[in-house]
Amino acid sequence: MNSFLNAALHASCEGIMVKSLDEDAGYTPSKRSDAWLKVKRDYVEGLNDSLDLVPIGAWHGNGRKAGWYSPFLMACYNPDTEEFQSVCRVMSGFSDSFYVEMRDFFDADKICQKKPPYYRSEEVPDMWFSPEVVWVIRGADFTVSPVHHAAIGLVHPSRGISVRFPRFIRCVSDRKPEECSTSADIADMFRSQIRKMDVKAEK
């Protein structure tokens, strides 16, 4: 299975589907089943280090998530410029109770009237939040992005770094927003990923 997964990842796929050999393991659209399993890189290996990011904005949820915030716009911090730079949107890993909690937490006092001048992103969420909390986020890998500004100028002159398939892991209660992952942290992790890919390609 590892060889199939590695081949899929090298082809820039999200992962592979694994099917049980049971006779009744048929596929039913829009229905979860233990007979069909999704295997993705972050489930097996993931980023070497998770990221501590700050939610700086969100969109209004649709469908089942109507009335909640989803997805959230996450950002790292650049201490040199004192800016929060967007990294990714995240909408995976949340429980329904957490959505309700965050809807109540980000009340009118924490919603900005306009985009703060110290936020850097090409994204335009439905609302901007003041920096309040830190969340642990884990994803599959890093990619250069024309939309997100994380580590812009450190790896690419005009593009930032983003995380593919990000998932919420937990809240961090002992860190202030300015103590989250920095743009330099993300640039270093991106370079580390590139070095590992080069080593694998040489084998």
Image (tube, helix red, strand yellow):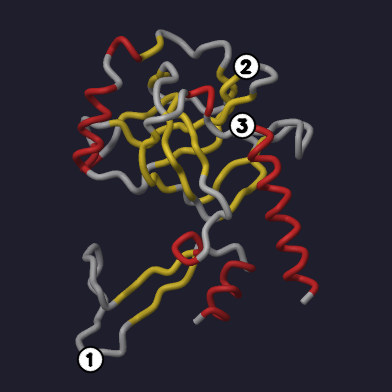
Do callouts 3 and 2 mark residues in contact (Cβ within 8 Å)?
no
Q: Which residue shows up at 43% across the image and 25% down it?
A: 125
Compare marks 2 and 1 and give the one earlier in the sequence: 1
Compare marks 3 and 2 and give the one earlier in the sequence: 2
Report the side of 12 relative to 27 (left or right).
right
Q: Which residue shows up at 29% across the image and 34% down it?
A: 61
Report the side of 157 relative to 84 (left or right).
right
Report the side of 102 relative to 122 (left or right).
left
Compare marks 1 and 3 and give the one earlier in the sequence: 1
Do callouts 1 and 3 mark residues in contact (Cβ within 8 Å)?
no
Q: Which residue shows up at 45% across the image and 32% down it?
A: 73
What type is the residue that disc 1 sits on?
A: Glu
Q: Which residue is mark 1?
A: 23
Can you say whether 29 is above or below 150 in the image?
below
Q: Which residue is mark 3?
A: 182
The x and y percentages for residue 144 are 67, 44
Can you say whether 44 is above or below 176 in the image?
below
Q: Nearer the viewer, residue 35 or 109?
A: 109
Do callouts 2 and 1 mark residues in contact (Cβ within 8 Å)?
no
Res. 158 image quadrant: top right
Q: Real-space Cα distance between discs 2 and 1? A: 59 Å
Q: Real-space Cα distance between discs 1 and 3? A: 50 Å
What type is the residue that disc 2 sits on?
A: Glu
What type is the residue that disc 3 sits on?
A: Thr
User: Label 1 neighbourhood size at 10 Å, few (<14), some (14-19), many (20+)?
Assistant: few
Query: Element at badge 3?
Result: loop
The x and y percentages for residue 115 are 49, 14
Report the side of 63 relative to 18 (left or right).
left
Q: Which residue is mark 2?
A: 82
Q: Which residue shows up at 80% across the image and 73% down it?
A: 202
User: Label 3 neighbourhood size at 10 Å, few (<14), some (14-19), many (20+)?
Assistant: many
Query: Element at badge 2?
Result: loop
